[in-house]
Amino acid sequence: MRSPLLRLVNPAHRAQAAWLLALMAASALTEGLGVMLLVPLLAAIEPGNTGGFGRSLAGLGLELTLGQALALFVVLVLVRGLINQARNTQAMRLELAVVAGLRRRAWRALLGADWRMLARLRRTDSASMLISNIDRVGDGINQAGGAFASLFTLGGLGLAGLFVTPLVTLCGALGGCLVLLAYRQMRRRAALLGERLGSAYDTLHGSLGDSLGALRTIKSLGSEARAEAAAFAGFSNLVRARLAYQRDLSMGQLTLQAGGAAVLAGLVWLAVTRWGLGAAAILPAVALFARTLPLLGVLQECWQNFAHSVPAIEAAWAMIDLAEAAREPELPPAPPPKMRTQVAVSHVSVRYSGSQAAALEQVSLTIRAGEIVLLGGPSGAGKSTLADVLGGLIGPDTGALQIDGKPLDPAERKAWRGRVAYVQQEPALLADTVRANLLWAEPDASDEHLRGVLHQAACQFVLDWPEGLETRIGDGGRTLSGGERQRLMLARALLRQPVLLILDEATSALDAANEAQVAAAIQQLKGRVTVLIIAHRGKLAELADRAYTLDKGRLVS
């Protein structure tokens, strides 16, 4: 199996990654040349005291004057600065492209997944993956880029060191490898802390998502203090996870700096007292190590940070793989079935993965065109699952969805969705204008069509507002009353000119007055639109021409 990091760089990003690696190599080359330039610079200042490498340059006729050496140094710094600027810009472009591609793939995977999988997926888990986890993936890419840049630069410096002071360089390289090897346990701990951080984020998203959706209930129960304590317990877990990681990172840097200084001091002592090297050879070596030691620290920090991000990358891929495995099959387009006489299910059974009991068991019922049918039963009886089968969202395990007596194949069932509209208990409204919320159902609808469905759904109040269709309704329609929200969702559903309208507990949270207004709007549709009402009692239930009752997935009446 490919590593999580390699999976991130798909073919569309390979050219960008190759260009970034080329810029890293060019930057490393200029870094190495800068160290090697110290030798001719010292030769220009103090001729004859430049060591073996300096004598080799002189033998090749590559001696430089002081002015030439200094001018070359300035040019080299300028070129390296320009290369580094291009490298950093390219690294950011690659990071943003990879993160955007991953987020798009994740969102596309969720949108294309089978409804059975989506219905059992916790909404906050999806939000956590799309926001926090994929943001942490971006951090991981950034850290991996930093590690590669450090490795390239260390390689360039190492090659330069082999030319200038080979023995000291080899000893230093061995010491650096031993230091990185000694950090293996710390990198493993970083991965573990990354898992804890991901878990803390997921828990926090879940807690806050539930609390934000229940603000009215929290306030009505006087549970503000309890909700605050629960939320900040999640924040505290997040803080603890981040502090634990930061302590490890700081300790690693301290150990590396102290150990690196000790290695450098030991090598200088050996070079002077044992190997008999002069200042012309030692000074470039000291400059080399003075540059190498911080780079080694950057490499270790990037490596550790990347290990900390790996659990987020793996979690994002796990969610994407789950959704893509449940992807609906690609089907040839089919014309939407035209219902003339009835919609029916025949001997339908549905079982969800991981559930012992069937959600539906051998259910058969018929809804005639233009009638209003009530579907009742206790919670968990399978009412919403049956509505999803009738609406074409779920294909039954056995049995068939039939239109005018003809069983639908998968392509026809998918096309049938375009003839069905849902109004559910929870408002699915955008924090936008009334117009934007309506056009979600039919982007090309004219203003005349919008006004027509508003009248049909008893939403004339919108047209009386000063800003009319341009009125912004807040997050989830919070500036509207419960009845206004439900009627606006009904207007959006009617904009599709549905053949079948499904009302899933659409008025269960409304007071009597608002429920009566919604019921009046549905009454006007009688005979023109086929309506399935899922409810226990109330004004909507009284509109039904016929009623069915489900219990434990079976039709009992």
Image (tube, rainbow, N blue to C red):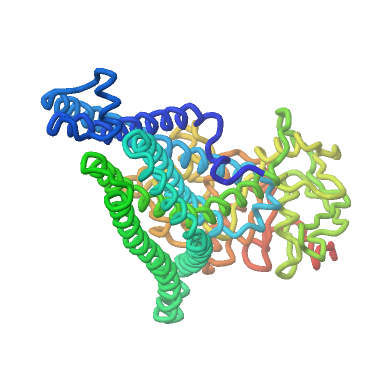
Across and down, in percent, residue 537 comes to 67, 68
Image quadrant holding the C terminus, namely bottom right
Left or right: where does residue 195 sit relative to residue 422?
left
Q: Is residue 262 visible?
A: yes
Q: Nearer the viewer, residue 351 or 193?
A: 193
Residue 133 percent coordinates (x, y): 49, 53
Does 94 sit left or right of 512 as displayed?
left
- Residue visible at 42% across and 79% down? 229
Please state the horizontal and vertical placement of residue 252, each as a whole percent of the image.
39, 62
Up the image or down, 73 lies above or below 96; here it is: above
Of residues 544 and 67, the one nearer the viewer is 67
What residue is drawn where x is 23% and y is 28%? 76
Residue 24 quadrant? top left
Where residue 300 sits: x, y (%)? Answer: 41, 53
In the depicted structure, whether residue 293 falls above or below residue 79: below
In-image side of 59 versus 369 (left or right): left
